[in-house]
Amino acid sequence: MKKEVKVSLGCKSQIIQFINMNSKSSCEIDVQDGHSFIDGKSIVGLLSLNLFKPLDVTVIGDDKKITELVHNYGTHQLLIG
């Protein structure tokens, strides 16, 4: 399964939470900022993006794992919309 969501990373703690959640997940996470795509588990890649605007996140993997990860994004107030 594949799910697309929008996230906002407004502060250092949210960036750290986002990377930690992604790193613990077995899902593939792609983050897009306009024309740039990076691995959602890469702190260096993430910091290369414009974090002042919402990011498009694509999560690919098992339905249950995707649902759990996206729920965690919501719990940490990272989701937009």
Image (cartoon, rainbow, N blue to C red):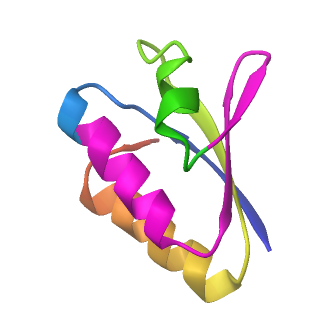
Q: How many marks?
A: 0
Question: In the picture provided, is 42 more to the left or to the right than 37?
Answer: left
Please tell me which residue is depicted at 36% across the width and 57% down the height of the picture.
20
In the rendered image, residue 38 lying in the magenta stretch gets the answer: yes
Q: Residue furthest bottom?
A: 64
Spot occupied by residue 35 in the image (x, y as percentages of width and height): 80, 16
Relative vertical location of residue 56 with respect to residue 11 in this rendering, above or below: below
In the rendered image, residue 28 lying in the magenta stretch gets the answer: yes
- Name the residue nearer the viewer: 8 or 51: 51
Q: Where are the magenta residues, as a range?
A: 14-39
- Name the residue nearer the viewer: 43 or 55: 43
Please tell me which residue is depicted at 51% across the width and 29% down the height of the picture.
44
Spot occupied by residue 41 in the image (x, y as percentages of width and height): 55, 50
Question: In the picture provided, is 70 more to the left or to the right than 64?
Answer: left
Quadrant occupied by the N terminus: bottom right
Relative vertical location of residue 25 with respect to residue 6 in this rendering, above or below: below
Please tell me which residue is depicted at 40% across the width and 62% down the height of the picture.
21
Spot occupied by residue 48 in the image (x, y as percentages of width and height): 55, 17
Spot occupied by residue 18 in the image (x, y as percentages of width and height): 38, 49
